[in-house]
Image: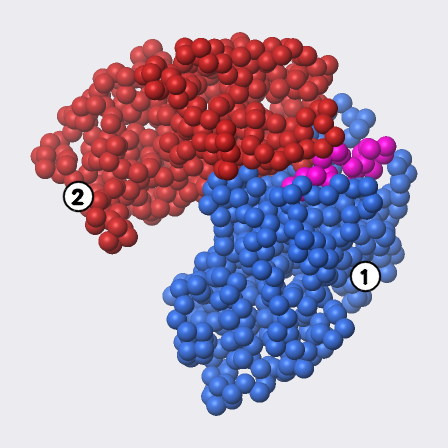
Chain colours: A blue, B red
Amino acid sequence: MPYEINETHDPNLKSWVESANDPATDFPIQNLPFCEFDTLAEGEEELEGLPKDGGVGVLIGDHVLSLVSCEAEGLIEKELGRSDELGDIMDFASFSTSTPRILSRLRRVVSGILRKDGKRIARRPAAKSRILYRQSDVRFSEMIVCNYTDFYASIHHATTVGAMFRPDNPLLPNYKWVPIGYHGRASSIVPSGTTITRPRGQTKADDAAAPTFGPCKLLDYEMEVGFFVGRGNDIGAPINIEQAEDHIFGLCLVNDWSARDMQKWEYQPLGPFLAKNFATTVSPYVVTMEALAPFRCPAMKRPDGDPAPLPHLFSERDQKLGGIDITLEVFLTSKQMRDRNLSPIRLSKGSFKDMYWTIAQLLTHHASNGCNMQPGDLLASGTISGQSPDSRGCLLELTWDGPGKPRKPIELPTGEKRTFLEDGDEVIMKGYCEREGFRRIGFGECRGIIAPAPGSAR
Amino acid sequence: MPYEINETHDPNLKSWVESANDPATDFPIQNLPFCEFDTLAEGEEELEGLPKDGGVGVLIGDHVLSLVSCEAEGLIEKELGRSDELGDIMDFASFSTSTPRILSRLRRVVSGILRKDGKRIARRPAAKSRILYRQSDVRFSEMIVCNYTDFYASIHHATTVGAMFRPDNPLLPNYKWVPIGYHGRASSIVPSGTTITRPRGQTKADDAAAPTFGPCKLLDYEMEVGFFVGRGNDIGAPINIEQAEDHIFGLCLVNDWSARDMQKWEYQPLGPFLAKNFATTVSPYVVTMEALAPFRCPAMKRPDGDPAPLPHLFSERDQKLGGIDITLEVFLTSKQMRDRNLSPIRLSKGSFKDMYWTIAQLLTHHASNGCNMQPGDLLASGTISGQSPDSRGCLLELTWDGPGKPRKPIELPTGEKRTFLEDGDEVIMKGYCEREGFRRIGFGECRGIIAPAPGSAR
């Protein structure tokens, strides 16, 4: 069942954490995303091998609220009651199996702890310093990901990319029937801020007789949205589309770094492999489905003439409210720009609502053959591009100027030009939701700087 | 460094576990594969939620030797000395990170415990009953697999399958340069003996206007060999081919169940997905690289005119000894055959030595872009087929009769016919190594029975 808008979404709600009331923050009290964190306790940590605090946290303004400490202070259990439905707050994968009902109750409790006019915390002001950490003082982890699947759910992306390789027939016949996806590599998923080493790999020029092995020359990012599985399903037992969203814990931003020259040479016939699995960056915060309730919208209207989804992928409610209106922006700085203190330039602005398949359809499809989804699995949308050129979510599309034409570089404020990423470039992705009458909520950032390939003079 | 043949391979070595001396056993004292097991302690187990014994075991004849119990009896530590290089024997993934040096020493210790003329155990015959379990009394797990990659390393398989879809151009231009592979689904890897539910999925007949959703009609198996990663590598730090085998813990059998009709409709452009991820069966025993030392052979000789591997995938030593001569057999029974007590029929007999790429090349390629391999990762070869038709490792190839021709069914002793698998069919895979002057060692079995699709009258 989709979550409903309730008092936790009230735009007038303020927090005693003052930075949460800043109109520019991604994390007002109306958001409350979960994260997995540990504190940087100098000295002690190294000696004991254990963080002072950590586990599941909640982002609020510039701070993180520790659920473990809240529990220790008696702030959670009494409100929530004892419940086996609340997963382990020290273990993110287990925590994500909490039922939607209990997550919703927990959201009210956390909102109550953090609101300015909250009574229980007002009576114990000293507790505030024991449950809250500055974000700059903690480490975020990429959360547990055992299985990672990447889809191809933006029809605009699929059409543009298809046109590069098959000008007359850009979209393959299965596209409008099958939510196309493939398995990605879970081990190389890293949290925002991790340096990305330029991969080396095999590439072959069209006119060359043989491939060569060396640093990737056409390094790209892909702007995606990911969603985490909460409760899983048993092997052999598909998920019905009407229940699909109950299995989704929340959303994050994903940068599916891509080595385009390697991809072109390797991807036939089994799909992308080394062109993608060297690194995938995620924003290490899970914006819950309940926080997104005010920003739900109809699924993308299929153009006239397109087939309806097959019955197992179709639900009236999903068509009506299966979309999510998330604005997605990609920014770039080069090393020169940072050295000169120039602001990042925006490369694109798109929306997650422009997807051909809803997240419920993606999950239902994935489990439709009986494949067992597990808590903490990450499913990503694939590159999100809209119809307009400035909404394209990767350089492969952004600098394409039509079949047979040379690529059109993007000019940076330093006079540098980019068709693909250079060493020292930083890609910064942002996502946020805005709607009249509601407080803006954001996804934080998903960023990474490119380091030179190993053993390379580039 | 490859392991050398030593006294643990001596064919005259006998064990006090009598079943290990049976010439037909897969698990003589010269083999000693590792497994992850727990005991079925009736009553107690359910009450306490804990097995009586378990963790890493060693297969010997019809029995399993418990390393935990050996340690408790003081049989391991004293011999091995305290060593940080030995991973946790309660945790298979951690155990697999043990260094080759320490695994080799452990093999000598275990061989010493199990040999008939071993002195320490002879002095304490009572300990024998505390360290050994009948295989029929324990449960084997599929071992921890966090990341699963499937390759396409048999050129005979790639050529035959390619010919079905592209008669004039069966092998794609990248095949002889790039060890083609893709990520599989880790969650649905199951141990031998697990029932396999026929998947449902989208398929489209060539002459149909639209696809339909229903039970797979062309269900197939794929005979593969898998290898487990022991020690991993850091992200961004490739593995050199000269060191690659040091990162390999051992081998097992893999059945990569495949829904051919779903595969055909879904696989473009990102590769196989739901056609494969409903289940993958493994033999839950790891035959170590050291046990295989006597059966090493040159890498497959590339046909004249084929390119040499690029330098990062080439090593003289790997060319000389990178192959492994494992005979692979696939058997089938139908329900009717089992009801009438008929023996399984053999569908194929091939060899793992017929691979275009060695396991060292597969692992080196996988990490060549900096992708981090992790302990317990499973990498599988892809379907193993030889040049002769009776060595083909899947029904897609076995019942193919040439382009445009109808499939040629396999006749069972009951008069039943098979082009693909029917409900109730059981597929049984076996693997073993034989060489003059050495004791035969085997991989055990990898088996699974097909159950009807959910909600299906099939």
- Magenta stretch: dominant secondary structure: loop
The spot of residue A209 in percent (x, y) is 76, 23
Name which residue lies at 58% across and 43% down: A366
Which secondary structure lies at badge 2? Answer: loop
Please state which of residues B244 and B276 is positioned toward the viewer in this rendering: B276
Displayed quadrant of residue A63: bottom right
Q: Amino acid at mark 2?
A: Glu
The image shows a total of numbered marks equal to: 2
First to last magenta residue range:
A161-181
Label 2 CA crowd tier, 10 Å (few <14, some 14–19, many 20+): some
Q: Residue at x 33, y 34 (%)?
A: B34
Q: Which residue is mark 2?
A: B73
Rendered location of residue B78, percent (x, y): 20, 43
Please check whether the numbered discs 2 and 1 fall on a single chain: no
Above or below residue B337? Residue B268 is below
- Say whether residue A226 is left or right of residue B409: right
Query: Disc 1 on helix, strand or loop?
Result: strand
Q: Position of residue A370 (x, y in %)?
A: 52, 40
Residue B204 seen from this side: yes
Residue at the spot of label 1: A345
Q: Tell me which residue sits at (57%, 41%) in the image.
A: A368
